[in-house]
Amino acid sequence: MPPPTLSLRQLNRTLLARQLLLQRQNLDCAGAIEALGGMQSQIPNPPYIGLWTRLSGFSKPQLTAALETRAVARAPWIRSTLHLVTADDHQRFQAVIQPALARGLRSFFGARAKGLDIERLIAIAKPYLEAKEPAIGELRDKLQEHQPDEDKQAMAYAVRSYLPLVQVPPSGAWGLGTRATYTTAESWLGAAAPSDLAALFRRYLAAFGPADVMDFQTWTGMTSLKSRLREALSTLVVYRDESGRALYDLPDQPTLDEDLPAPIRFLPEYDNILIGHKDRRRILPEAHRRKVFVSAGRVLGSVIIDGFVAAIWKVEREKERVTLRVTLFEERTADVLEKIEVEGLALARFIEEDAAAHRVEFTGPA
């Protein structure tokens, strides 16, 4: 019997549910971040917005507390990108994704990283990081004291790539910008736990499935994984998408009806739901991709309308007045605009809670 075929809208509704976007959930921060497979966090504020849009009663101090109590860490993670990840997941999966971090070093620095003595750099950096909790700039200077003829940026990135690091709070907390201090994951979170690639693939499917191995590779930044996952694939449910591509899923995970209503949801910059698949059409129509993915790798804040990204947004503040500006990609009915305005006003108050006045303005279609 051939595998069942899932429509694009079935994949959309299933993804929204697994990414906690069909209805707000009663989860703590660590539970939500685990369910999401981590949250991209190049800059501190977007994960706070991402949790606000997914959780009931979320407030900024909840995530800050999760960082301070070490339930959640901000660390170099999948795709060599800063993420928020639970302490358990970090220590369980860091060794699995380490080859992708090493690949990032080669990609970013090329010849500048060739010939670096990684063991020597780690021997210098580890005690310094654990004793001083320095900023990356300070680590660069320390490494250059010992290795004056090497590229200090490449040396620091090599340490970041081969020695598991985490940022020390208040790094990563709301409103603190991008300056950060680091220590080793071992000293901050404890000993690493054993795991394997198949376990990470199952965690990915729970958050982003049904999906194929190429989607998983896009999410992790890793390559050539299908042969390594062959045994795991044999234990999974198989579907087809409308183009006939095989998609894998966990046996105990449901797929959802395409007619389920999807609420208005505001996504922050860099939300992983937009980066979790090679083929992003299940959430972002191809016609709109370049409106969301813009220059220098930036991913704009976006709005989900009827399940799919259909607008972008930004907040502007002038003294005590805050405007959340929504740029629509298509004309919308008055009823839809009213729902966007209600959700947008709530978000504006969350972001700029000390302002005296908040409003939503529409522009577009773009």
Image (spheres, helix red, strand yellow):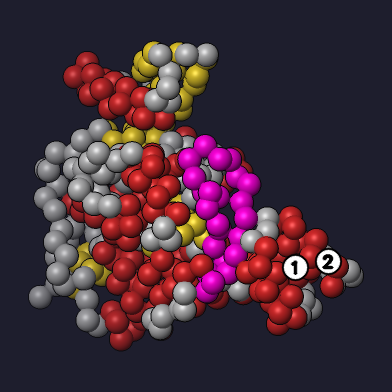
- Up-down: is 185 above or below 74? below
Q: Residue at x 48, y 40 (%)?
A: 174
- Identify the magenta region: 165-187
Q: Position of residue 253 (x, y in %)?
A: 16, 65
Report which quarter residue 178 is drawn in: top right
Q: Residue at x 76, y 61 (%)?
A: 140
Measured as percent of width and height from the top left, residue 111 is found at: 78, 69
Residue found at x 21% / y 71%:
250
Image coordinates of residue 343 in percent, x first then y, are: 27, 27
The image position of residue 73, as x and y in percent, is: 46, 59
Q: Which residue is mark 1?
A: 155
Q: Which mark is residue 35?
A: none
Q: Mark 2 = which residue? A: 144
Which tag is nearer the camera, tag 1 or tag 2?
A: 2
Q: Which residue extends farthest bottom?
A: 231
Q: Quadrant of residue 144?
A: bottom right
Which secondary structure dominates the residues rendered in magenta? loop
Closest to the observer, 98 or 138: 138
Q: Is residue 322 above or below residue 116?
A: above
- Please determine whether, in this image, residue 125 is positioned above or below residue 137: below
Residue 144 versus residue 306: which sits nearer the camera?
A: 144
Look at label 1 and name its amino acid: Met
Q: CA distance from mark 1 to mark 2?
A: 8 Å
Q: Earlier in the sequence, mark 1 or mark 2?
A: 2
Please, what secondary structure does the residue beneath circle 1 have?
A: helix
Q: Is residue 140 left or right of residue 161?
A: right
Can residue 99 be seen here? The reply is: yes
